[in-house]
Image: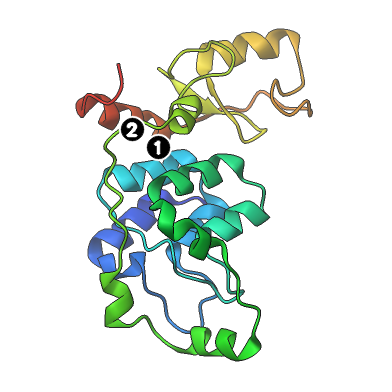
Amino acid sequence: ACKTYDWATVDNMLERDPRLLNEKPPYRLNYFIHYLVLYGDVRKLSDYVLRSYQFQFQLKNADDKTPLALAQEQRLDELVEEIQSLIPSDDRESATMNDEREDDRSVFVDSPPTIDNRKSSVPTTVQRVTPQLLKNLTCMLTKQIFVDPVKASDGKTYERNAIIGWLRENRVSPQTGEFIDDILVDDIPTKNLIIQLRQQNLLP
C-alpha cells in the first residue's frame, strides 16, 4: 500500500494491528518506517508522529540500514532533518551506523523483534513544529502556510491558486526546473496535518 501511496489502507492496517508499526515478517525487506522513508515524505511522517505513533528509529532493514541511514543514502534532506529531531542526540550515532557483517545481517532478517527491542520505542509525540516541518507546510510560491495544498506532477506540494497562476506562464517546475503538466492532485495528508496542528495550537 505504501508503494501505491494508498495511505488510507495503511492507516486502516495500523489501526487494526498497531504491531505492524515496528514489526515485520522475516520475508519482508523493510519495516514500515523504512517504507515511509522510501515512499512517504516529511509531512506524512509528522502526521503519524502527531497521532502518537511511536517509531523505533533504531530498527534496521535487510540491508542493515536504519531509517535515518536510509534517508541519508537517498539524500532526502527533509526527512533526515525531521528524523534527527525525533531521536535523542545520544542515539543518533548508533542510528546511522551500518554493520556490514553478513552473519549479523542474516540473523536480523530471520529473527522477529524481541520483547526487549519493542520496549525501546522512542517517544515521538509532537510537542512543537520544527523549522523543517514548518518549511514543508509553507508554499514556496506564496511563502504562506498552505490553505488548499495540491501536488503537481513534479511531486512537490503547492498552494492551488499559486501553482495554477505559475502554470499559465511557465511549463517547468518552480522547484526542479523540469517540465510539468497541469495535473494537480489534492494533498489531503498535508491539509489534514495542518488542521491537526492548529487544533493543538502548534500552528497560527
Q: Amino acid at mark 1?
A: Pro
User: Mark 2 near mark 1, Cβ–Cβ under 8 Å?
Assistant: yes
The secondary structure type at the circle numbered 2 is helix
Q: Nearer the viewer, residue 112 or 131?
A: 131
C-alpha separation, residue under disc 2 versus residue under disc 1: 5 Å
Q: Does residue 169 appear left or right of residue 155 in this picture?
A: right
- The total number of labels drawn is 2
The secondary structure type at the circle numbered 1 is helix
Q: Which residue is mark 1?
A: 189
Q: Give the residue drawn at x 46%, y 68%.
A: 31
Q: Residues within 10 Å of mark 1 (few under 14, many from 20)?
A: some
* Residue 76 in picture, x, y percent from top left: 61, 45
* Residue 41 in picture, x, y percent from top left: 51, 43
Q: Does residue 170 appear left or right of residue 146 in this picture?
A: right
Q: Amino acid at mark 2?
A: Asn
Answer whether residue 138 is visible to the viewer in this image: yes
* Residue 157 in picture, x, y percent from top left: 55, 28
Quarter containing the C terminus: top left
Q: Which residue is mark 2?
A: 192
Q: Pick out the residue farthest to the left.
A: 200
Q: Give the residue drawn at x 26%, y 68%.
A: 17
As displayed, is residue 83 above or below residue 200? below
* Residue 67 in picture, x, y percent from top left: 51, 60
As displayed, is residue 171 above or below residue 71? above
Q: Give the residue drawn at x 60%, y 13%.
A: 164
As displayed, is residue 158 above or below residue 47? above
Which mark is on residue 58?
none
Answer whether residue 2 is visible to the viewer in this image: no
Quadrant housing residue 176: top right
Q: Give the residue drawn at x 60%, y 16%.
A: 163
